[in-house]
Amino acid sequence: MEENTVAKKGKLGKIVSIVFVLLLVAYFIATQSWRMSGTNQWELKREGNGAQVYTLKAPGVYLVQAKGKIKVNTSLSAVVSFLQDTEACPNFGCLDAKIIDRKGENFFYWAFKYPMPFGLPAREFVTSNIYYQDPESKTIFYNHTAVPEKLPADDCCVRVTNYSVHWKITPLSNNEVEIDMTRNLDLGGYLPDLMVNLGVVDRTYNLLFNFKEHMEKDIYKNAQYDFIQELEAETIVADN
């Protein structure tokens, strides 16, 4: 009787081992197939409330890039004021935002943190922020990129090393501003790429939608910067 029980347990153990190996093989094949897939082209994934979200999957890369576009009835200076407002960070899920080194109105460094679900350690971002306005089109280009070596590592969090967001803020003739954002993000640590990829479209859409909502606040409307020339002011000078 005992021998039969031992034999059954041994057989069950072999079956479990075989299933486990097969699952590992299937996972490896699936991940490799996903890595090699992709059109390397931007594809529209979500649209609504004036916002469009695109994704790009490049062959040989696990993570998906995201791009969003939206139009807002506001000024260039108001957009920049909002983007530089550390107190607005909690509206987008981040915490402890602070400017750690400022070189001027259009160049500074800052740090912020993002809490993670399922008890995972928070992610800490340390970034450079550089603004440039094209003197002819008045379009503003804003590069927001990781500089993880700018601050010593903190045991509280996983320091994000691969992060870049490129903004293109274009003034339109009808007192609107068109905002284009392209983001490439790797949260690092022990976080499955699948988890990051699954939420990239909704996170980008919510960012744009919240952006438009908060830009309507009076706090940003009267902002002015020496390095920014509004399209309306240029048009008035030309007319005179």
Image (tube, helix red, strand yellow):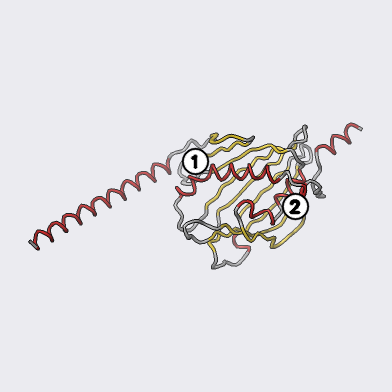
Q: Which residue is tagged 2?
A: 106
107 w.r.t. 71: above or below: below
- Give SS at disc 1: loop
**Which residue corresponds to the image point at 51% horizontal and 37% vertical from the top-left?**
40
The residue that appears at 60% across and 34% down in the rendered structure is 48
> Residue 126 location, x and y as percent?
62, 59
223 left or right of 41 in image: right
Structural crowding at the residue carrying mark 1, measured as other residues with C-alpha within 10 Å and reported as few (<14), some (14–19) or many (≥20): some
The answer to which of 138 and 44 lies nearer the viewer is: 44
> Could you tell me the amino acid type at mark 2?
Asn
Q: Nearer the viewer, residue 24 or 216?
A: 216
Task: Please state the horizontal and vertical placement of residue 185, each as a whole percent of the image.
Answer: 55, 50
- Rate crowding at label 2 as few (under 14), some (14 to 19) or many (20 or more) other CA atoms within 10 Å: some
Residue name at image x 77 percent, y 39 percent: 138
Q: Nearer the viewer, residue 120 or 137?
A: 120
Within the image, what quadrant is residue 230 found in? top right
Contact flag, marks 2 and 1 (Cβ < 8 Å): no
CA distance separating discs 2 and 1:
32 Å
Picture disc at residue 58:
1
Secondary structure at badge 2 equals loop
The amino acid sitting under disc 1 is Ala
* Between discs 2 and 1, the one toward the N terminus: 1
Q: Residue at x 58, y 44 (%)?
A: 204
Q: Which mark is residue 196?
A: none
Horizontal and vertical percent for residue 214? 69, 46
> Relative to residue 104, is residue 186 drawn left or right?
left
Q: Quadrant of the C terminus?
A: top right
Residue 124, image x and y in percent?
58, 60
Residue 174 vs 117, above or below: the answer is above
Residue furthest toward the left? 1
Residue 50 in which image quadrant: top right
Q: Quadrant of the N terminus?
A: bottom left
